[in-house]
Amino acid sequence: MNRSPRSTGFTLIELVVVMGILSGFLVLLVQLVDTGLRLFQEGELGQLLADRTSRVQSVLTAELGQLRGSGTGRDRDTVDDRLVVQRLPLGLPPLAERDPTTVQVLRAAVHLPADRESVLRDALLAMRALEARPELSPAEVDQAVAAARPTEPLRGIGNLLLVPWRQEGADDALLELRAAWFLPDQKVPVGPERSVDPATVAVPGSADLPGLVVMQNTTVLLRDLLHVEFLLWSQTTTAWGSTPAAELGSGGSSPEAIWDSARGGWLVDAASGGAFAFDRGTWSAADPTDDVQPHAILVRAVVAQPDHVAAEGLLADGIDADDQGLVLVDGDRFPGPSDGGWIKLRGEWIRYGSRDGDVLRGLQRGQRGTKPRAHDAGVRVHVGRSVEFVVPVPHARDDWNG
């Protein structure tokens, strides 16, 4: 009997089984690759944020480490090492809105490195030369500066101004920290035939030192910040605590958020930048033996995630200024802790109590000196990376008798 030869190919069932196995392997491979890429991206992002926080710490430690002052106040006739920290409206507008977003503005006497002071001195000498002879060419200005240098030796001292500012861009959650350094008694022009020493103005942003002048005379020290604050350890402080500077009162066992080392009557109410617990009045401003200096400064900062990576979160629905909950897009990927934390929506800081899936509940609005406001759907939800560090003040000085 003749038999037909057996087919050497695969049956349909065998092909289906093989394709199913291959599909499973492909799905597994895709998942592994996706997980690997996600972990790699998270690692890169984590390193970038770590680098940013490290830079914030190194830069501000270096700047605050240059603070100058006397631990005794003896053998001095004038107050020339004043430290002033005020809480003022962001952008230093002349007429602030009701309950404005506020930031801390720091001014202090500092030691100036030779290279920095040389640049400031040459700029000052050039300005003087042009004021005397406006027709001078750039080469002639350089000659005048070189000739005047011997009459202006370096002294190694000056004044520092630190002011947070809204960073240019579409997302007004971002801040930059601007800085300026001035020689002792150096003045800046604030109008026609009028100039002022920034260290002697009671309230920056007032007519004596308009916000526009501050911006023109400062440069960007740090960018892509969500928050920066300073807390100062006084003679009555017993612990740093976790309360933000914007929520601290004056005096007591907590650190101070407002400071005037001369206790000279500048800081008496919100309009002047806050009330200083140890203020004594205008008579104290000219008494150098009456000064008080903090023992240390605690810096708290939050750096933003780079804008070229996916947002940490997005608002699924708009919220009003008094809403106590919000809905996220894909809350499972939100990096904030589920048991409560901080977020920033545009210019407003919010503390939430818990996260349940896509929903953040128990919102405390307008935190860290910001103002509650409405936010549209799709707004970027910032978490950022926080850093906290202490800078000791070697010339600390108390006044235990009040």
Image: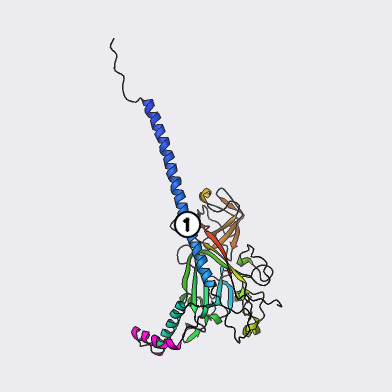
State the residue position of label 1: 47
**Quarter of the image holding residue 240?**
bottom right
146 drawn magenta: yes
Relative to 351, say whether 10 is above or below.
above
Give the residue at x 40% y 35%. 23
Which residue of the protein is positioned furthest toward the bottom in this rendering? 132
Residue for point 42% across, 82% down: 122
Local crowd at mark 1 within 10 Å, few (<14), some, or many (≥20)?
Answer: few
The x and y percentages for residue 251 are 68, 71
Question: Secondary structure under badge 1?
Answer: helix
Q: Residue 186: x, y in percent?
A: 50, 83
| 387 lies above or below 197 | above
Residue with the most extreme right position: 401
Amino acid type at image mark 1: Gln
Q: Give residue 279's quadrant in the image.
A: bottom right
Q: Nearer the viewer, residue 270 or 96?
A: 270
